[in-house]
Amino acid sequence: MKMKAFRLDERTVAEMEEIRDHKRFPTQSDFVRSAIRRLIREERHRRIRAQIQREMRAEPSAEGQEVADPLIEDWFKRLERADRGEL
C-alpha cells in the first residue's frame, strides 16, 4: 500500500469523527479509504451513464429509449456487483 498525506481542515475531521462507526472503520485512514473508493465508483458510474446518454441522443427514438433503459440499469447493477468483487 502506498502512503499519501492529505490535509483536512479541523471542521472536516470533526465531522468525520462524528459520523465514523469505529467498529466498521477502526481508523481514520480506513474511513478515508472507503470514502475515496466510494467517490471513485460513483464518478465512474456517472461518467458511464453520461456517455450512454450522449450515445442515445445521437440517434433518438422512443422505441430505442424503451429498450435501452432496462439495459442501462442492468449494466449499472453489473457494475455494482463488480465493485463488490462479485464478478
Image (cartoon, grey):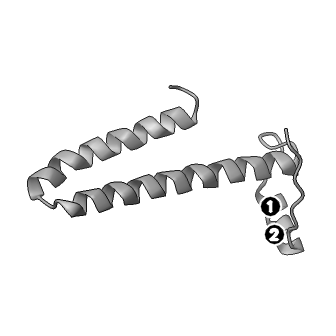
Relative to the observer, which residue lies in front, 17 or 6?
Answer: 6
Measuring 81% from the left and 69% from the top, which residue is drawn there? 12
Local packing at callout 1 (Cα closer than 10 Å; few below 14, some 14-19, many 20+) is some
Vertical order, 34 against 5 (above or below): above
Q: Please indicate whether residue 15 sits to the left or right of residue 74 in the image.
A: right
Tell me the residue that label 2 is attached to. Answer: 12
**Residue 2, quarter of picture:** top right
Image vertical order of residue 37 relative to residue 87, above or below: below
Which residue type does callout 2 highlight? Thr
Q: CA distance from mark 2 to mark 1?
A: 6 Å
Q: Position of residue 26 (x, y in %)?
A: 86, 42
Question: Depth check: 42 or 13 in front?
Answer: 42
Identify the residue shown where x is 33% and y is 54%: 52
Name the residue: 17% across, 59% down: 59
The residue tagged with tag 1: helix, strand or loop? helix
Q: Position of residue 38 (x, y in %)?
A: 63, 50
Image quadrant holding the N terminus, namely top right
Can residue 21 be seen? no
Identify the residue at image location x=17%, y=45%: 67
Q: Is residue 35 left or right of residue 15?
A: left
- Residue 16: mark: 1
Q: Is residue 52 left or right of residue 68?
A: right
Under tag 2, what secondary structure? helix
